[in-house]
Amino acid sequence: MESSPDLTLALIGFGEAGSTFAKAAGWESLALAHDIDPERRAVMLEAGVVACATAEDALGDAGLVLSLVTADSALDAARDDAPLLRPGALWCDMNSVAPETKRAAAEAIEAAGGRYVDVAVLAPVNPARMKVPLLLSGAAAEDAADALRAAGFTNVRVVGAEVGRASAIKMIRSVMVKGIEALTAEMMLAATAAGVTGEVLASLDASEKTIGWTERAAYNLERMTTHGARRAAEMEESARTLAALGVEPVMTAGTVRRQRELAGQTNAFQTRRTEVA
């Protein structure tokens, strides 16, 4: 990333996404980071970025801000930090939330003199890292696209000038992606309880050869047990998106529950297999 006042970068939230981007891009001292969890300071130092004790310290000189908090904190972060932004700063909201949530965040940022950009992240940040697909929308989306490319992101596309358009694509897409994971978990819970896992997976392999279901099931379950809480929060936003469109989110509501139930349950399927045996 070029050293320029306009490209001075701030990261609000330094979880998996923030740390992955910082290490992959090599931002080091050009990036300032703040996280409400003080234990993330060690991760910031490991990544080489400037660890800031307060959001004010991180945002004071930043021309480009990446909001990378949890879905349920995205709106609060925008409202709390908006007064701290320098005039004209780009606030790139990369959180997985509903269009209505992003429009509310945009109101707060723009009322304070910042420029809000709706950013949808369309794939896991690992292993994609700086190649992760980003969709941008909002009045400042073109400027943000240039800034993000200068920061090292290589797969950036503007999809419109309306805040909420990028997140609508992400949220509606998530109905399928996270829904398949939740259905996989339900199937596997039943199959392991009945002791027929191998036969069930083999029958699916026989009908669909693109990716073996043994591999697919393991991948989907790992996504849920590792990231279920975050994904459940995202799917609550997907449910809001569907409801706003007049579509009752029946399966999506079930996906929220299943993702949350399986979060952290790394031994759930092994335990059931042992009980059946």
Image (cartoon, rainbow, N blue to C red):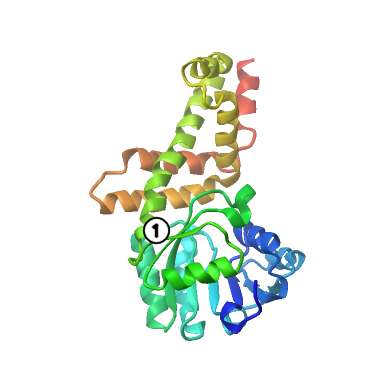
As drawn, the residue found furthest toward the left would be: 246
Q: Specify whether residue 197 is in view.
A: yes
x, y (%) of residue 113?
42, 84
> What amino acid is labelled 1 in the image?
Ala
x, y (%) of residue 4?
62, 81
x, y (%) of residue 222?
60, 38
Q: Which residue is drawn at 60% across and 44% down?
A: 226
Q: In this view, does 89 lie above or below 207?
A: below
**Relative to 231, 170 lies left or right:** left
Q: In this view, does 77 lie above or below 235?
A: below
- 217 or 196, nearer to the observer: 217
Q: Quadrant of the N terminus?
A: bottom right
Q: Specify whether residue 77 is in view.
A: no
Q: Residue at x 72, y 71 (%)?
A: 28
Q: Quadrant of the C terminus?
A: top right
x, y (%) of residue 148?
54, 67
Q: Which residue is drawn at 42% across and 73% down?
A: 116
Q: Residues within 10 Å of mark 1 (few under 14, many from 20)?
A: many
Q: Which quadrant holds residue 35?
A: bottom right
Instruction: Provide the secondary structure element on which disc 1 rests.
Output: helix
**Relative to 256, 31 lies left or right:** right
Q: Please give the count of numbered marks on the rendered protein.
A: 1
Q: Which quadrant holds residue 159?
A: bottom left
- 62 or 258, nearer to the observer: 62
Q: In this view, does 59 lie above or below 37?
A: below
Q: What residue sits right under mark 1 in the picture?
A: 166
Q: Which residue is drawn at 25% across and 51% down?
A: 245
As drawn, the residue found furthest toward the right would be: 46
